[in-house]
Amino acid sequence: MNDTLSNILHIDLSRKRFWTEDRNELFNEMIGGSGVAINLLEQECPKGIDPLAPENPIILAVGPLTGLYPIASKTVAMFKSPLTGNLGESHCGGRSAVAIRFAGYGAIIIKGASETPVYLSIHGDKVRFRDASVIWNMANSYTVGRILREKESGSGIRSIMRIGRAGENQVSYASVVTETYRHFGRLGLGAVFGSKQLKALVISGKKNIPVSDMKGYRETYKEIFKLLSTAEMRKYHELGTSMNIIPLNKLGALPAKNLQTSKFENAEAISGETFEKNFLGRRVSCAHCPVACIHLAALREAYESEPYFYKTEMISYDYELIYALGSMLGITSPQALLKLMDEVEILGLDAMSTGVALAWATEAQQKEIITTKETNGLKLKWNDEESYSKAINYIAAQVNEFYKTLGKGVTYASSKYGGKEFALAFGGNEMPGYHTGPATHLGFLIGSRHSHLDGAGYSIDQKALAKNSKPSATEIIDKLIEEEAWRQILSSLVICFFARGIYKPELISKAFKPIGKEFTEEQLKTIGLRILKQKYRFKKREGFSLKNLEIPERIFQTETPSGKLSKEIFNEGLKIAELKLTSI
Amino acid sequence: MKRLSVVDVNLCVGCQCCMMACNRRFGEGGIAESAIQIKSIGGVERGFIVMVCRACKDPPCMKVCPTNALTKRPGGGVILNHSKCIGCKRCAETCIIDAISWDESVEKPVICVHCGYCTDYCEYDVIKMEEVK
């Protein structure tokens, strides 16, 4: 049997047709995941299109090691982002990657738009377009998952990707939810699904992957598996990413109240430790990953109308959600925070963009840039869980002009109402939870996804702090680009970034051998740079320039652990990045 | 003799590394030929089910096999003789815990041989090998 990785499934939602295409050369050259997806995006996405137009392709790609080795379990989605109007890339775990791989595909391209709500049912070679009218406009994304679980086969091995109301209403930062607790969160894939009237995608399969050297494969597998049970990985299983709340707050790097401050007085109450002690109900894993970093809190709630009646919700929490919906909004109660997280999950929004948007709106209302006329009667203020819960629903439902505007992100909202200086977005994408120093913000600015995960600037800042050193703009930019280029290899192999310390170049080369593929460390690094360069080529094609990037004034006003940021390092850094990124 | 035993299903995180291990031990990379299956109870938040042969002393699957392709394994469970099997699926239908998987590529059952290879790849001690008296 041949490896089916190079099979690409094309789906045309307008004509309800599908076909497969073999792109062996593309997978051989660009590996998979991000590398393959950026090539397909360049080919499939016409220049200058509206991200919500039928022509915008949704590309989902997995990698050669998916299903073969542990933790190569991410699916890379690429599309033109409705939030930034530029490169959209989002990674998701759950069962998504393994299911796509075992269904017999390396990538899926979805184009066109359906005239009526539809969901895709893909089980191996069988692809069906199914009427989704009944589940369209359903209030709760959990319910949609439950219904599809009953309706579809493949229990245990399938992935169910779906959107909520936010995606249906094309909120620019709507997410796609998979297996209830994992997401294509950032940059608005949910809105692209919604624009195509694509409610969900169910996929499963049982195709084996041929291995030329079984003995070598088993040995290498064993070695990798062992490395994944070391302390370096266990931290993600124990407290999980929320372990960072207390140390980052101590450092003075945890953005709070729209980054009016970088220390949150109630951090302890919403810390990983608090959640573990009082709420942690279960930890689960993505398919083919022994780490199990997904932390689910059990929240018991009484029904007000019905005595002795309770429900227990399981709610997924992580560092970024605690930051965006917690400290950024001044939320001091862990229960209140969990409810906001749940609301975001139910409606299918990106938690980070939603939190930052609400933080901006709160400050805008404080400063009387907007009034209750805009907010639909709400008086947004820090720690006011009830108002925030309503506002989240107003965004998803797009109830009035203001929420329609806010649903396009803070860059857009502030261009209309004012308050740019405290609109915390970089390249159009709302800020992640790190105010660690210059590298993190330079990373948000120059990263191809404007994400903390692109070049991990927060790590550069923290290492510098530990060594009491002040890296120059050149040093920071070099490190960011080097890291982002290498991460292109990880995301082409769709290895979770949590395992970046395990899957070093040497180990990756070794993992390839039993499947008859050879990549040297040098080759991998060259391909990584090439992918990054291609992403920038796409970004430029769509009008991106490092020269006209806006930097919110707020980041210069609020202390970082190394003091206030200097503008010079940003001016210099962006100039250097411009030179380097055009010359790589 | 030993048999594979499910110790505490509440410890299961649903990573499915046991499934991949079983497939790797006997076949290629994947899950199609795995004799152990993990699925959620209905949403991962509610936990998981481990579906695997529990080594019956008096195996119902064996009794319904029309070609005697299944014989008693010392220590419980059965041994499959592939050449005798006609792929009628009666064994799989008879097992009420759905512990017999089906290999669609050859239309034959996949039945746990209690080798214990999967237990080395369960990080959470959900499954272990147990001595049978």
Image (cartoon, coloured by chain):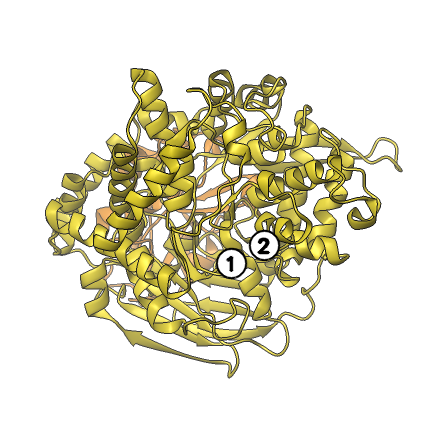
Chain colours: A yellow, B orange
> Is any part of residue A152 visible from this angle?
no
Circles 1, 2 touching at the beta carbon (< 8 Å) = yes
Whole-percent x, y for residue B48 in the image: 50, 41
- The residue at the far bottom in this view is A15
Taking depth in this image into account, of A384 and B101 the one nearest to the observer is A384
Q: Quick check: A114 left or right of A23?
A: right
Spatial CA distance of label 1 from label 2 is 7 Å
Q: Earlier in the sequence, mark 1 or mark 2?
A: 2
Does any portion of residue A301 appear in the rendered image?
yes
Q: Chain of mark 2?
A: A
Residue shown at the point (53%, 36%) measured from the top left: A553
Residue type, numbered disc 2: Ala
Residue type of the residue flagged with mark 1: Leu
User: In this view of the protein, which residue sits in the foreground, B39 or A90?
Assistant: A90
Residue B74 screen position, x and y as percent: 28, 39
Q: Which residue is mark 2?
A: A174
In front of the other: A191 or A557: A557
Give me the residue at 13% from left, 56% from top.
A517
* Label 1 environment density (alpha carbons within 10 Å; few <14, some 14–19, many ≥20): many
The quarter of the picture where the N terminus of chain A appears is: bottom left
Where residue A6 sits, quadrant-wise, is bottom left
Circle on res. A62: none
Q: Secondary structure at mark 2?
A: loop
Question: How far across and down, in percent of the image, does residue A450 sit?
Answer: 43, 46
**Secondary structure category for the residue under label 1:** helix
Using residue A466 as the reference point, say whether residue A398 is left or right of it: right
Q: Which residue is mark 1?
A: A189
Residue pictured at 45% horizontal, 60% vertical: A86
The picture places residue A230, in percent across and down from the top left corner, at 29, 25
